[in-house]
Image (cartoon, rainbow, N blue to C red):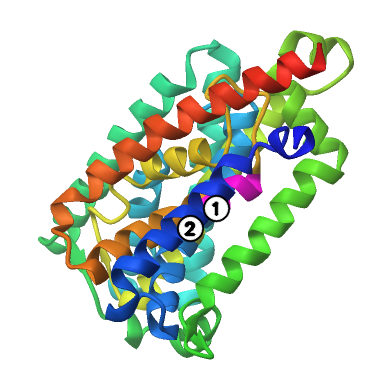
Amino acid sequence: MRKLLNRPEFGAVGGTAAIWLFFAFYAGGSGFLTWPGTASYLEIASELGILAAAVSLLMIAGEFDLSVGSTIAATGMTISLLCERLGWSLWAAIAAAGVLALGVGFLNGLVVVRTRLPSFIVTLGTLFILSGSTIGVTRLVTGRTQVGGLHEALHYGAAETLFASRIGGFSVSIFWWLALTALTAWVLLRTRFGNWIFGAGGAPDAARNLGVPVARVKIALFMTTALAAWFVATSQAIKFTGTDVLRGTGKELEAILAAVIGGTLLTGGYGSVIGAGFGALIFGMVQQGIVFSGIDSDWYKVFLGAMLITAVLVNSYVRGKVMEARR
């Protein structure tokens, strides 16, 4: 039991099981337990899970990225505008949007490590800059806030297969989520870079004295969160054959919440990518479970707020017990 409690994702796994049982009982006869019902909440969880995997790594390193949601809107709109207005092939537009995302992540990380300003403030500023720029440029170029017609772009069919197809009734994004979560978990738990992440968040000064390139680690993780946002934006743009300037709004908070539910501490140095995946799964089940149960969707955020407070309390309690046991 002590070993189980020592796992950051312990509370998230228990919470996932409890929520599944709750909706299985109240909404099992309405479609929650069917294959299509399962596919629906897994698809919702997959996009958030991709973001949460990257965000949890950054939080373990002791930093936050509030610009993730606006990066989704900016990179998605970049793809649509390049294809719809300039006639670029879809692959070229996706690559250009990826470069933009990496640039945003690099600048976020560079400003944070060079100025030592709180990443909360720096990325909040980036959020407003990207959000305003996306809306302003899109209105200036198109006169609208939505750009569609992406299905007419060159190479759309191949991109659709990679980012928006279905396998056995399940969205391909689910398989991307599982693969990327497994990859990031392996990096965190089985590589030297993973040790550097824990050190950068838990004891940065001691890590520097041991030769850990803390600044480079944090910049790389900011670039990783931006790249995750680009991936989600690409999937959404291809799935919906277009982009909206408000797409991605609030996703940064949901990703942080999923990471916290998954056992990642807000203070850094402790957390789990796998736990963040379970946190995203809880989101998906709650969002679709409310629909299947016939509960007014206005109560959705009440569930999220309650889960956040509960997760923080549980994580603090478990962490305290683990520290007592180690003494």
Residue numbers of the magenta segment: 273-278
Contact (Cβ within 8 Å) of mark 1 with mark 2: yes
* Image side of residue 63 versus residue 30, left or right: right
Q: For the residue labelled by badge 1, is the local secondary structure a helix, a strand or a loop?
A: helix
In the rendering, at what x and y percent does residue 266 appear? 52, 24
Residue occupying the point 63% across, 17% down? 320
Residue occupying the point 81% across, 17% down? 326
Residue beneath disc 1: 278
| Quadrant of residue 221 within the rendered picture | top right
In the image, residue 275 lies in the stretch drawn in magenta: yes
Total count of labels: 2
Classify 195 as above or below 80: above
Residue occupying the point 39% across, 84% down? 36
Residue occupying the point 53% across, 87% down? 158
Residue type beneath disc 1: Phe
In the rendering, at what x and y percent does residue 172 appear? 53, 78
* Image side of residue 172 versus residue 132, left or right: right
Classify 41 as above or below 218: below
Residue beneath disc 2: 281
In the image, residue 63 lies in the stretch drawn in magenta: no
| Quadrant of residue 132 within the rendered picture | top left
Residue type beneath disc 2: Leu
**Quadrant of the frame with the C terminus:** top right
